[in-house]
Every structure is written in C-alpha cells, then in structure tokens.
Amino acid sequence: MPLDTSTYTLALLRLDGRRWNELRRMHAQISIQAAADGSSYLEMGNTKVICTVAGPSEGRRTGGGGDDNATVQVEIGIAGFSGVDRKKRGRGDKRTSEMQMTIANAFSNTLFTDLYPHSTILITLHVLSQDGSLLAACLNAATLALIDAGVPMSDYVVACTSGSTSSYSNNDEAADPLLDLNGTEEQELPFLTVGTLGAGDKVSVLVMESRVQASRLEGMLAVGVDGCKQVREILDQAVRVHGKRILESVVK
C-alpha cells in the first residue's frame, strides 16, 4: 500500500504526528542483565533491542599474526515475531550479516582494542520489535552496553536515520528531508543510516540501501548528523542516571 504523503504537504506533519526534524520517543536502560559483562535495553519508537557484551575475554589462538588488537565480534538475533511478516531470519541471512559487519567495523575503529591483545569482545543483539531505524538502534544499544562493560572507547557511537519526502522516480525538487523514519516510511521513501562519533560532525557509519537524487543527499546527511547530536544527549543522560544510581548505592 503506497504511503499517503498528502497530509504532510497540508499540515507539515507526518503520519505519526511528528514534524520533519523530530525524533521518536527514545527509552534507554543500562545493566539490565547481571550475568553479562555489559548490557542495555533501547527503544526507538516501536523498535526494541536488547544488547549484551561479553569480554574482553581470551580469544582463540590462531596460527597467524595480527592479534595485537582485540577482535570485535557481533551476533544479531531477530525474533520471528519482531516484524509484521513474522519471518524468522537464519544465521546466513544476508541483511543480518551486513549489519553485523557494519557494527563490528564501527566499534573496531572506536574502541581502544590495542589495550586488550589476543582477546575477543562479543556484542550480542536481540531484536524484539522492528519499526524502522533497526541498524541505528543496534548501534546505540551496543554503545550503552559497551559503556556498561567498561570497555574504553574514544567517544559515543550514535546513529539515526534520515530520508526524503519524495522517491527517486518522482524527482520532486521540493522534497524535504525527514528525521528518524519509522517502518512504514522506510518501505516507501529513500533513507540512509548515519552514525557519528561524539557530539561533533565526524561520520563513522554511513549506510544507504535505496536510490535517491544526488541533490538531496547533502540535506539528508545534514539532518541525520543533527539527529545524531540529539540521540547522543539522550544516551548521555541515560549513562549519567545509571552512574548516579551506582554512586548512591555505594555511598549508602
């Protein structure tokens, strides 16, 4: 069913009542599983992800070299009931493998892996519900879990999605960028996932799976980077609340 964008042109509001530059409601919790070295729970709208971190732990010894840095491994499990189609993805699913590689590369360049030679950091993500911005939610949840595990990193890796109000075939010059697309919008509109390092404009992750006019790409990227700054404030607040709770328990 095509996405009805007529209301956007009249009231400048999207189907869920947000304006073009508004994030969906975000909720984050840290240290939700005592058995894991680090864990987190994140909601971005109706997209819900649980992340656990194991390690750094001793990795398997291999005959070759290249063990001077820790190896970051990512495993993603998507529940069959998480999406509308109720499709169970296997271990060999192409999209899941691409997401695992993207997340592993992002954190391999952000974590201080040289402090843990011959070791492995395992990031496990469980997707409970999907409604857009899945890769961004996984990156944000992994950041919180790694912070909970005490793995040193240069800064937060935060991510969100941005899109355009017109598809590639329409070639609408008056198309506006959108921030934090939901599942319905992602099915009909071109979008990209952008991840930044810290509160600056340094892009560490950029993934685009749809076609878009080149003239709109700069606007979409600028909106995405600005959205990442808003996400960082939310994650930072969650970390501070958790740290304050730990400090109060120690003092008592």
Image (spheres, grey):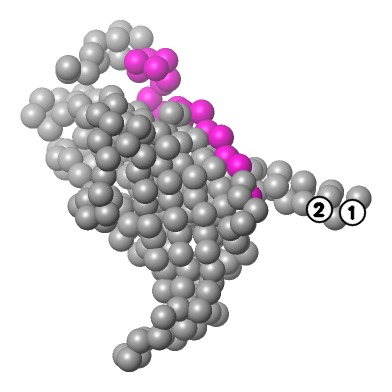
Secondary structure under the numbered disc 2 in the rendered image: helix
Q: Amino acid at mark 2?
A: Leu
Instruction: For the residues labelled 2 and 1, say whether their Cβ atoms are less than 8 Å apart.
Output: yes
The residue depicted at 61 percent of the width and 42 percent of the height is 29
User: Taking 103 as reference, is 153 above or below it?
Assistant: below
- Pointer 2 residue: 247
In the rendering, at what x and y percent does residue 18 appear? 42, 20
Judge the density around disc 2: few (<14), some (14-19), many (≥20) Cα neighbours within 10 Å. few
Q: Nearer the viewer, residue 252 or 232?
A: 252
Looking at the rendered structure, the secondary structure element under dot 1 is helix
Depicted 125 relative to depicted 68: above or below: above
Q: Horizontal and vertical percent for residue 82?
A: 36, 33
**Residue linked to disc 1:** 251
Q: Is residue 72 found inside the magenta-colored segment of the image?
A: no
- Please report the residue visible at 64 percent of the width from the left and 43 percent of the height from the top: 237
Instruction: Please state which amino acid type lies under the numbered disc 1.
Output: Val
- Residue segment shown in magenta: 13-31
In which quadrant of the rendered image does the N terminus lie?
Answer: top left
Horizontal relation, residue 246 to residue 159: left or right = right
List x then y, in percent, for residue 64.
31, 90
Residue 125 in view of the camera = yes
Q: Is residue 69 above or below residue 77?
A: below
Q: Looking at the image, which residue sits at the far right?
A: 252
Quadrant housing residue 155:
bottom right
Q: Residue at x 39, y 66 (%)?
A: 73
Q: Quadrant of residue 222?
A: top left
Residue at (83, 50) in percent of width and height: 249
In the displayed structure, 216 sits above or below 5; it is: below
Main SS type for the magenta part?
loop
Depth check, front residue: 122 or 193: 122
In the picture provided, is 205 more to the left or to the right than 236? left
